[in-house]
């Protein structure tokens, strides 16, 4: 029996795909009825016409039940159960009437029962069918008929076990495909957010510095040239960061992001004030906090109309904290996981690492605050889609 299912699987693979078992897998077992068919056509049966009708009825019910047993909806349908009961009655009638090779219909009945009845009702059905087959076989052929009872029980249980395992494998394969699809979607989302954060900040700095250079061109050529040099430097740095992001190995640096934010703020006419205290955070936490500084400073340049912006980094033995506060307009959206695309993405990243991000108006300005645990590295370095840790510094979702 196991060989039959294996053969079906190999044949399907040779055709270009691994097919799920179906009713054709159980059809060859009807060859067990060849002895009964020989009795009918050889005239050995007491009533060949009645035996032939019984054989035709049994085969028809067997095919009906087995082909409907490979789909859960049809397998559990009342018509399938009724057909299985009728098949049991026909088997008992033929076995009691003719005996001999006609008793082999009980193992065939076991195959159909194993295909149609699954756990948790299988044990009871298999035991009851085995007892029934034994009782009929013993009453017809004596104690030698106990072999029929064993064969019936074995065929029932083995068929159900093989088909249940096949179902489990197909479900597992479908689950793996779904997980792979979700992993691809998450990676696309991660990449789009990385590009948003990279290009949004860089283009904002370039626009601000270009405006400054335009204003200075007529009255201070040296200062305008300095702004143009900064634009070139920012552009080259952006190219490097985008290449690193594409390859997945971009390592964030909080100090570098703070320096870049201060430069952008000064170019926009905003006075930057930087304060740092406490021990330096772990590299992964530093990368996440660098994204916070970058996004918050970009929003200050774009939307705040501020004259002063304070960037404060502090930490203790348990958590590290970044606070970006400006004195501009405080009418931007409040964010605790919502808000704009950048802040919303950052809130999700920090939540994955066990941290929090809040943003909202405060005392005439706008404040963005992010906190992370000191052991955020463990939360950030989650396995990738293939069980391999993501590259250091890459945000995870």
Image: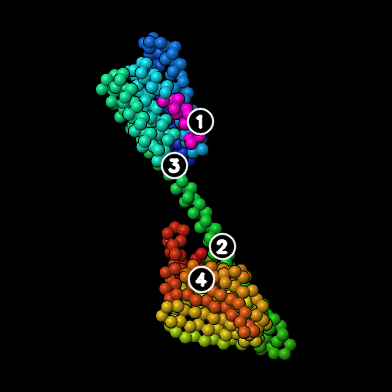
Q: How is the image coloured?
A: rainbow
Mark 4 and mark 3 in contact? Answer it, CB < 8 Å. Answer: no
Is residue 362 magenta-colored? no
Q: Which mark is residue 189?
A: 2
Residue at horizontal 28 percent and vertical 26 percent from the top = 147
Mark 1 and mark 3 in contact? Answer it, CB < 8 Å. Answer: no
Could you tell me how far apart the alpha carbons at marks 2 and 1 are, in whole angstroms?
A: 49 Å
Q: Which mark is residue 385?
A: none
Report helix, strand or loop for mark 1: helix
- Relative side of 179 to 39, left or right: right
Residue at horizontal 36 percent and vertical 18 percent from the top = 96
Residue at horizontal 53 percent and vertical 61 percent from the top = 187
Picture coordinates of residue 148, whole percent (x, y): 31, 25
Quickly name the residue at label 3: 167
Quickly name the residue at label 1: 79
Badge 4: residue crowd in 10 Å (few <14, some 14–19, many ≥20): many
For the record, the magenta segment spans: 75-88
Question: Disc 2 or disc 1, which is closer to the eye?
Answer: 1
Badge 1: residue crowd in 10 Å (few <14, some 14–19, many ≥20): some
Report helix, strand or loop for mark 3: helix
Mark 2 and mark 3 in contact? Answer it, CB < 8 Å. Answer: no
Question: Disc 2 or disc 4, which is closer to the eye?
Answer: 4
Report helix, strand or loop for mark 4: helix
Badge 2: residue crowd in 10 Å (few <14, some 14–19, many ≥20): some
Could you tell me how far apart the alpha carbons at marks 2 and 3 are, in whole angstroms?
A: 33 Å
- Relative side of 294 to 20, left or right: right
Q: Is residue 225 visible?
A: no
Could you tell me how far apart the alpha carbons at marks 2 and 4 are, in whole angstroms?
A: 15 Å
Q: Which mark is residue 350?
A: 4
Q: Is residue 368 visible?
A: yes
């Amino acid at each position: 029996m196991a060989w039959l299912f294996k053969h079906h699987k190999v044949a399907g693979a040779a055709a270009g795909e691994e097919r799920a078992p179906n009713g054709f897998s159980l059809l060859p077992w009807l060859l067990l009825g060849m002895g009964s068919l020989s009795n009918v056509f050889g005239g050995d049966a007491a009533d060949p016409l009645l035996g032939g009708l019984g054989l035709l009825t049994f085969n028809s019910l067997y095919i009906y039940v087995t082909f409907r047993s490979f789909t859960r909806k049809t397998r559990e349908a009342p018509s399938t159960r009724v057909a299985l009961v009728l098949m049991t009655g026909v088997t008992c009638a033929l076995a009691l009437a003719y005996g001999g090779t006609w008793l082999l219909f009980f193992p065939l009945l076991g195959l159909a029962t194993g295909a149609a009845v699954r756990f948790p009702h299988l044990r009871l059905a298999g035991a009851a069918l085995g007892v029934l087959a034994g009782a009929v076989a013993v009453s017809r052929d004596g104690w030698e008929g106990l072999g029929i009872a064993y064969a019936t029980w074995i065929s029932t249980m083995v068929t159900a076990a093989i088909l249940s395992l096949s179902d489990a494998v197909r479900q597992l394969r479908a689950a793996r495909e779904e997980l792979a699809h979700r992993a691809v979607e998450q990676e696309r989302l991660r990449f789009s957010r990385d590009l948003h954060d990279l290009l949004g900040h860089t283009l904002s700095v370039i626009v601000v510095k270009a405006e400054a250079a335009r204003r200075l061109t007529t009255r201070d050529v040296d200062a305008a040239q300095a702004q143009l040099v900064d634009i070139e430097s920012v552009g080259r740095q952006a190219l490097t960061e985008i290449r690193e992001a594409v390859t997945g190995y971009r390592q964030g640096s909080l100090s570098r992001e703070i320096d870049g934010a201060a430069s952008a703020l000064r170019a926009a006419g905003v006075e930057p004030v930087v304060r740092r205290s406490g021990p330096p955070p772990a590299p992964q936490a530093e990368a996440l906090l660098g994204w916070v500084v970058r996004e918050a400073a970009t929003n200050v340049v774009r939307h705040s109309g501020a004259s002063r912006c304070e960037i404060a980094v502090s930490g203790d033995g348990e958590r590290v904290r970044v606070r970006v506060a400006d004195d501009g307009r405080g009418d931007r959206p409040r964010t605790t996981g919502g808000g704009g695309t950048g802040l919303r993405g950052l809130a999700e990243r920090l939540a994955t690492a066990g941290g929090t991000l809040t943003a909202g108006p405060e005392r005439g300005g706008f404040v963005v605050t992010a906190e992370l645990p000191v052991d955020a590295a463990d939360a950030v370095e989650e396995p990738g889609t293939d069980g391999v840790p993501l590259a250091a510094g890459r945000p995870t979702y």
